[in-house]
Image (spheres, grey):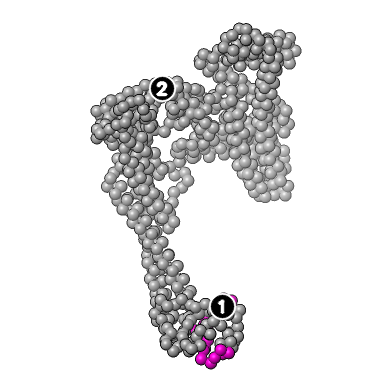
Amino acid sequence: MAIVKMKRLRMVAMTADREALLRRLQHMGCVEVVQPEADPDDPLWAALTPPETGGLAAAHEEKTQAERALEVLKRYKALPKSGFLDPKPGVQEGELFDEAGAKAARDMAREVNDLDRRLAAIRAEENKLDAQKDVLRPWMDLDLPLETGSTAQVTIQLGTLPANVPMNQAEGELQAIGELAQLTEVYNAERDFHYCMLVCHTSQAEDVLEKLKALGWSRANLRDWTGTAAENLGRLYQETKALKAEAASIEEKLSGMGQSAAALRQLSDLANVTMSREESRSRLMDTGQTFLLEGWVPEESWPALKQELDKFPCACEVGDPAPEEYEKVPVKLKNNTLTRPLNMVTEMYSLPAYGTLDPNPLMAPFFILFYGIMMADMGYGLLMMLAGAIILKKKKPGGTFGHLCGLLVLCGVTTFIMGALTGGFFGDFLTQVVKLTTGGDFALPALFTPLEDTMMILVGAMCLGFVQIITGMAVSFVSKLKNGQVMDAVFEEVTWWVVFAGLGLMIAGITPIVLILGGVLLVVGCVAQSYVRTGGNVVMTILTAFGRTGISLCGNLYNHVTGYFGDILSYSRLMALMLAGSVIAQVFNTLGAIPGNIVIFLIISFAGNALNFALNLLGCYVHDLRLQCLEYFGKFYQDGGKPFRPLDLNTKYYEVVK
């Protein structure tokens, strides 16, 4: 239950062994490869060059193709259905890296993606044919080849007039120009256009076209067509039919390719693993025959790693990081079953800085207890325990989701216990059921209830908050002593413990001598701080301290008193959420009981409690997280750590069996 100690690893090995070494490191999953820091004063550094990165781009492209193929199969419902609780299937490491299987999967991905691209091309061609049909359809009744053009004596044009122009008006105006022009309506689109054919003698063509343009004439662009519109439409319909048949055949083929999903997922995982290895490879530095690798390895993993590296002709150096390097050292937390689920809470805030404390063991009891106090219902607790345990057993999730399920079980236990103490089971669900079915009175035994003992719960919540704050101060006190900050530990923690003890004794009616002692320590602390600021100059310390002690002391008192008071008062949210959850559950149960029908009661009660349960799951988590991050962590926690990300077999679809 601590931050794992890290070793800095430096290794020089033969370039010929680079791929084998990286695969071995990836198999062990215990080394985070980092970019070496350039040393401008070292003339040998100029001879080092980064390796080629083409493999990373190739692996990324392979992953993209595999994921795209899976998305295509999903779109055509070819993927086998999997349940939410189904765990990730296992695959042997050798099977994952099997080149023959990978090649077959690549061919399969290429085939699926080619079929999908052909389908996209067919859709585009169908849209093009549909647009051409729309152009030809108004001229379908025209028994004249569309390529027919004007002659030396006769001008022929196909075109459109706006629908708001009456045809008899257009014909009359043409007749007024001369009798050698005829405008024939081929198709009337009513709301859009009149589709017409113009035939006139060349001598009158210029005047006729000028008059038609004034009416809104637009020439139809049909010069690229040959044959009649009906003949062309028939051909287009045949082409569309053929394309639809081809598309249906491809869709049917894609729908039947579900058996390839496993290989495609395995290919995607292989590409992901290769990308991780290539990213680490890009951080190496090469010479002509050797390469340099720098990284971090957990101290506990070094013996096994050294045994593996001894099989290669390489030179290794490991050492503890210097304090000035701590901000660069990755952080790995080592926790037990009880505290490991709290990793998700810590990571959501920030990992602790290397060389400091792991907050999980210090936070776990308070977080789990506070959640149970706020939720405080046996029914909700049972649901949380069952949901978390079933998911952990069936799905076996890892990472953040696994931590969440583990935390759900632990918080469900405290929720059930607090529910038993307050007599809550989905609010007063059992009381209402007994009343509706038998007419009798029934209530679960309770040590205290949120509605009747509100003040007691409020005081208890703030007392628990005071205990947590004192715990944080104690942790800070020990940490400062370990770091040699004795004066800070005494005057920033011990002084206020004395003040708190004095206040408690004074409230109990005992002489305030302890409180006076605390005030003296505050003054001494202010003088000591002045001494440190002045660099140990006694005269300046006296002048500074006595010149401003009153101001410093008042400011220190004000800041700390209001700060501690606000922190402790913040724990009243434990009572508030317990009361809110209990009241909301009882309100829904009461509403359901009003009609006097057990069926209606069950429907309303279940719906209301489901809503209350969902809101409380999130609300209690957020408020509990706030208490830890603001009121508790502020007393001792040093954040800023970066997570340890070793080169490992990280996969999405399969669990690799090493």
Q: State whether residue 211 is above or below residue 454.
A: below
State which region is magenta.
175-197
Task: Classify residue 159 as left or right of residue 269.
Answer: right
Residue at image location 39% in from the left, 41% down from the top:
651
Q: Which mark is residue 56?
A: none
Q: Which mark is residue 216?
A: 1
Q: Is residue 185 magenta?
A: yes
Residue at image location 49% in from the left, 35% down from the top:
403
Q: Which mark is residue 321?
A: 2
Question: Residue 31: horizontal and vertical position, in percent?
Answer: 37, 30
Q: State whether residue 298 is above or below residue 531.
A: below
Quarter-of-image position of residue 120 = bottom left
Task: Classify residue 53 as left or right of residue 324.
Answer: left
Task: Classify residue 493 as left or right of residue 286.
Answer: right
Residue at image location 59% in from the left, 38% down from the top:
617
Q: CA distance from mark 2 to mark 1?
A: 84 Å
Asked whether residue 228 is in view, the answer is no
Q: Residue furthest bottom?
A: 179
Asked whether residue 551 is in view, the answer is yes
Question: Residue 284: horizontal and vertical position, in percent?
Answer: 33, 33
Q: Quadrant of the C terminus?
A: top left
Quarter-of-image position of residue 375 = top right
Q: Amino acid at mark 2?
A: Pro
Q: Residues within 10 Å of mark 2 (few under 14, many from 20)?
A: some
